[in-house]
Image (cartoon, coloured by chain):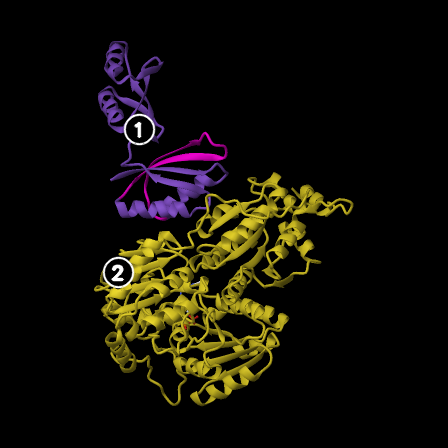
Chain colours: A yellow, B purple
Amino acid sequence: MRAEAVKFDNQMMEDPATKEKTGAKMLMECFLREGVDVVFGYPGGAVIPIYDALYEAPIHHIISRHEQGAIHAADGYARATGRVGVCIGTSGPGATNLVTGITNAFMDSIPLVVITGQVPTSLIGTDAFQEADITGITMPITKHNYLVQNVNDIPRIMKEAFYIARSGRPGPVVIDIPKDISYATGAFHYPDSIHLPSYQPTVEPNASQVSKVAMAISEAKKPIILAGGGVLSASAEHELLLFAEKLQIPVTTTLMGLGGFPAAHPLWLGMPGMHGTVTANRAIQNSDLLISLGARFDDRVTGNIERFAPNAKIVHIDIDPAELGKIINTQYPLVSDIKYALQKLIKMVKPTDTMGWVGQVLHWKKEKPLTFKDTNQQIKPQYVIQQISKITKGKAIISTDVGQHQMWAAQFYHFEKTRSMLTSGGLGTMGFGLPAAIGAQIGKPDQTVILISGDGSIQMNIQELATIAEQQLPIKIVILNNSFLGMVRQWQEIFHDKRYSSTPMKGPDFVKLADAYSILGLRATTKEMVRETLEKGFNHSGPVIMEFIVEKEENVLPFVPPGASLDEMIEEGQE
Amino acid sequence: MKHTLSIIVNNQAGVLTRIAGLFNRRGFNIDSITVGRTEEQGLSRMTIVVQGDQRLVEQVKKQLHKQIDVHKVMDITNEPMVARELIMIKVKASPTTLQEITNLIEPFRAAVIDVAHSTITIQATGNEEKLNAIIELLRPYGIKDLVRTGFAAIQRG
Ligand SMILES: Cc1ncc(C[n+]2csc(CCOP(=O)(O)OP(=O)(O)O)c2C)c(N)n1
């Protein structure tokens, strides 16, 4: 095996006399043709030829400190920019370290192309050093994957991979490239078109089905729009706004849909579901027509599915036919890109009188805003987020980790802009936030990127502080330190009689840690200090960690306990 | 209820794993599965028999469709079709029962494909009902081994 590896390493990369390219150089050429100017990754033996080609390619490579950091960064980049994120990892442990990130992107339908190195073809199947069957491992967590067996296939596979990743319902595609294939040479032909007869996503809606939906909407008295991540992937935010305004239909956005409809809009009801607003949940339960746009009826949104929207007919518009009828029976299924569907519906639907209904819903909105018991001494985590929202006017890019802080960010930050909430929705991956913020800041260098994290989550990919320092990314890191794995503690409090098994958390001194990375570190311990800490942090030109020592046992409310229906919310003040 | 799905897939490494894995992780139970090349180059046909209600089968079909390597998914359960399976049964046989068994299988157009010292091996093809009938008839003699290929199905006309 060793002799084999040395042989490959010493092989000539390219014969300058011919037009032949190595597999690695073909890869670079494909990146350029797909408009890729930045990739995230981490080198290793099996990808040395690829890194050698990167060395002189006009492509910015961001080296992370762990492959999980690289892939979440590619994911954050994709979420913030709407482009395909690209990530590279080596064979074996490099590839397996990517698995959580691939699953995370798969669950949230984020377009990624992930390149993994593989042991040389001749060694595949021999349990060679750093061999892992990554195509086998990632079959259930990718939209598609490839094991390259011939260097001449690289251009076609790359073109297909980018197309598959971003078209239809987006998702991650893995390309596993054996080392000998990266070194092998062939003539480079980039195909003009894609030939995938078995993959033809439906984009335009069926006309007669659209008429039925239009009819149902014009007959509804109490319609509500449930907008999910599909609105963002289809870039249908503008159409959603026109549609809701023209027909005067209130809008609730799922965690993945936040920012897809401006929070300041009077028709916006907040997020529905387990930690949703009273208004959004009530409106769903009382509606007679629920129009789902690119949402997938996740159990965190619906609560008890049997008693979800009991009086409503369901219009379900999604680009993925498999979502229709998967969770909930649908009277009006429509397979379509959300943008096209809305464009058609805006033209066709006759506005009806929803004034009474909208009046009712707005009354709830006024009567039942999200609240928390504020104090004068202790810092309430919700207060910190409210202040961040005010200072940035809801226009920053917010990346979160997973836990209470994530839900508070979703509740108390008023997202005015699309693609500004980067959060792990489907998988709920602690450790997502910091690298995702890196990807977002790389993709959106002129925008303010803020990470809202907890003292637990931040420690899951904290090594990426080095990446931030190295790249001098001016990310504003907010740690809401409650000395607990707060969300788990909350469940232990409510369902397990406060038996806090393994949830008290000890962290490092985050201010000293910041210093160790040459990052500005600030700490606030009283409510008074919150505003000045935030202002100082936001005015600093470089990266900053702001640690807020918050109330330890604060709960996220409202709360629909698992298995309960959306009517059965535990609200603030009635715990 | 049992559904028979006829699926056209790319004849490529890993496709069987992809399809079988999909059934497994979505909690769909495969009753039987057969794979073979079609007359068209690069394509294979899978015949999968799956248990479940209409809604589950709808979901199975849609999930199969999402696979990039899947060209076509047809639920041919209620279509005019012919489904056949081949079975081989090794039964205990002594000189006294040998003729009896041979007579017994005759109406099924089954064939004796091996006779050994104390066993006889029979091959039969047919639909599920017929094959179950043969198996039940032979059971009293003592079945030593049973091999089933799973169903292959084709639409009529
Ligand atoms: C990788 C991973 N491991 C475990 C969990 C389970 N989990 C969900 S929330 C949570 C606590 C998060 O704590 P922290 O980051 O401090 O945030 P807080 O809830 O206190 O705001 C845990 C452990 C998870 N979501 N992801």
Do callouts 2 and 1 mark residues in contact (Cβ within 8 Å)? Answer: no
| Residue in the picture at 24% in, 68% down | A287
Q: What residue range appears in magenta?
A: B26-52
Label 2 CB less than 8 angstroms from ligand 1: no
Give coordinates of residue A338: x percent, y percent: 40, 61
Give coordinates of residue B92: x percent, y percent: 29, 18
Quarter occupied by residue A109 = bottom left
Badge 1 crowding class, 10 Å Cα cut-off, few under 14, some 14 to 19, many 20 or more, is some
Q: Would you say residue A499 is visible in this rendering?
A: no
The type of residue carrying mark 2 is Ile
Please check the rendered image and state whether residue A510 is part of the magenta-colored stretch, yes or no.
Answer: no
Badge 2 crowding class, 10 Å Cα cut-off, few under 14, some 14 to 19, many 20 or more, is some
Q: Is A521 on the left-hand or right-hand side of A49?
A: left
Q: Please give the residue where the numbered disc 2 appears in the rendered image.
A: A305
Query: Of helix, strand and loop, which mostly describes the magenta segment?
Result: strand
Q: Of the residues tagged 2 and 1, which is closer to the observer?
A: 1
Q: Please give the residue where the numbered disc 1 appears in the rendered image.
A: B82
* Same subunit: marks 2 and 1: no
Quadrant location, the N terminus of chain B: top left
Quarter occupied by residue B120 = top left
Q: What is the chain identity of the residue bearing mark 2?
A: A
The type of residue carrying mark 1 is Val
Quarter of the picture for ligand 1?
bottom left
Give coordinates of residue A246: x percent, y percent: 35, 72
Q: Would you say residue A201 is visible in this rendering?
A: yes
